[in-house]
Image: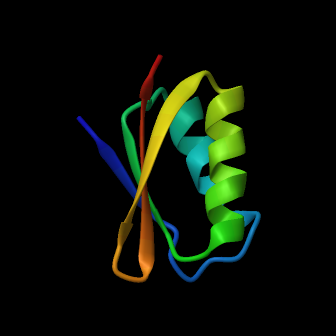
């Protein structure tokens, strides 16, 4: 099951903290919503360190990051 994390409107490091908690709980299939490039880049760095593959796409003003176990 995909866990959704809505980190729109949050400044770093809050999006990274939310994703870290989700990964620590054992979630690897994530859909993360962010609304700025800095949060996107920081979350992508985290997912790489955690061994997850990530895909990004735009959804209007938002950025959607989907992760899965490698």
Q: What quarter of the picture does the N terminus occupy? A: top left
Question: Is 27 located above or below residue 15 in the figure?
Answer: above
Furthest residue toward top:
70
Q: Residue at x 75, y 68 (%)?
A: 12
Q: Residue at x 63, y 46 (%)?
A: 44
Q: Is residue 17 visible?
A: no
Q: Position of residue 32 (x, y in %)?
A: 44, 56
Q: Quadrant of residue 45?
A: top right
Numbered circles on residues, count = 0
Q: Residue at x 61, y 75 (%)?
A: 36
Q: Position of residue 31 (x, y in %)?
A: 37, 50
Question: Is 3 located above or below residue 6 in the figure?
Answer: above
Q: Is residue 27 left or right of residue 7?
A: left
Q: Is residue 60 left or right of residue 21?
A: left
Question: Is 10 located above or below residue 16 in the figure?
Answer: below
Q: Position of residue 67 (x, y in %)?
A: 43, 37
Furthest residue toward right:
13
């Amino acid at each position: 099951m995909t866990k959704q994390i809505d980190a729109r409107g949050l400044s770093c490091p809050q999006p990274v903290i939310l994703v870290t908690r989700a990964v620590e709980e054992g979630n690897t299939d994530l859909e993360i919503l962010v609304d700025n490039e800095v949060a996107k880049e920081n979350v992508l760095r985290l997912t790489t360190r955690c061994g997850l593959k990530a895909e990004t796409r735009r959804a209007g003003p938002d950025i959607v990051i989907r992760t899965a176990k490698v």
